[in-house]
Image (tube, rainbow, N blue to C red):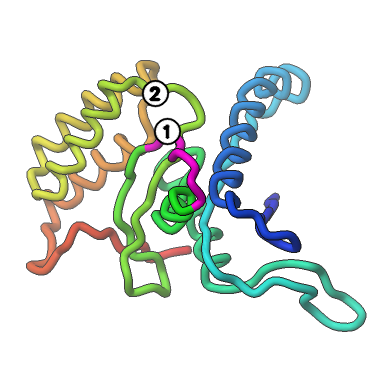
Amino acid sequence: DAVMAFWGAPLDQAKHAANACKSAKIMLQKLAEHRPRFQSQYGVEVNIGIGINSGLVNVGNMGSDRIFEYTVIGDHVNLASRLEGLTKYYGAGIVTSRFTFDLILKGGEPLPAHRTLDSVKVKGKKEAIELIQVLERDYDAEGLKLFEEARQLYLQQKWDEAIARFKEASAKLEPGESGDGPSLMYIERCQELKTTGVEPDWDGAWKMTSK
């Protein structure tokens, strides 16, 4: 139920981070094309989430003399797996990290269309990771602007104002009944924080308690 792909080995690719994001976008675009057929032919709704991360890893033949495979291991691989898991939490198709975006710029490529989702401390890590959603289709520009405004209100702990703005963003970004996944997640989180409050040294980073 999962596929891992990696770029940059065995042959070096200067634009590996950009290529990963381009591939992810094409995967979601193709899935959108075929989803109606899967529904009519097999009676199933197919959805996927893609996590992308970039960094130094160990690569080569891993395993024993009897069973081995050419693969990658390391902290950045583990983080990619965490990001894949977070696609469900945020209701976003593609979630990547600032590490990947920094390397896209380093490779001289333009950044793909995106929005900053959150700052998160994933399980097992002390430092916060900036999460970014790569947009696989055209999103309403006003809706994206409203989402960022709402996120800033959230960081200022203005819960009611943030909730109202996230509702506006959701209506713009996903006019249907389903709503915009990240906006709905923030609305629920703000409502929770209104009740529980935050710690005095809260820096806006959300702590994930599960993988």
Q: Is residue 33 above or below residue 210?
A: above
The amino acid pointed to by label 2 is Tyr
Q: Over which residues does the magenta segment extend?
A: 107-114
Q: Are marks 1 and 2 in contact (CB under 8 Å)?
A: yes
Name which residue lies at 58% across and 38% down. Answer: 22
Q: Would residue 111 be counted in the magenta stretch?
A: yes
* Distance from Cα at disc 1 to Cα at disc 2: 9 Å
Q: Which residue is mark 2?
A: 139
Q: Residue at x 52, y 59 (%)?
A: 54
Q: Quadrant of residue 205?
A: bottom left
SS label for mark 2: loop
Which image quadrant is residue 36 in?
top right
Q: Considering the whole magenta stretch, tell me its main secondary structure.
A: loop
Q: Foreground residue, 200 or 72?
A: 72
Instruction: Look at discs 1 and 2 and give the one toward the viewer.
Output: 1
Residue 20's x, y, as percent?
Answer: 59, 46
Q: For label 2, count other residues whose C-alpha is less than 10 Å away and answer few (under 14), some (14-19) or many (20+).
A: some
Image position of 190 (left or right of 104): left
Which residue shows up at 19% across the image and 57% down it? Answer: 204
Q: Which residue is mark 1?
A: 113
Q: Given the image, on which type of amino acid does mark 1 rest?
A: Ala
The answer to which image quadrant residue 57 occupies is bottom right
The residue located at (57%, 34%) in the rendering is 25
Q: Which mark is residue 140?
A: none
Q: Is residue 59 left or right of residue 111?
A: right
Which of pointers 1 and 2 lies earlier in the amino acid sequence? 1
Is 1 included in the stretch rendered in magenta?
Answer: no
Q: Is residue 187 above or below residue 6?
A: above
Picture layout, residue 175 above or below residue 6: above
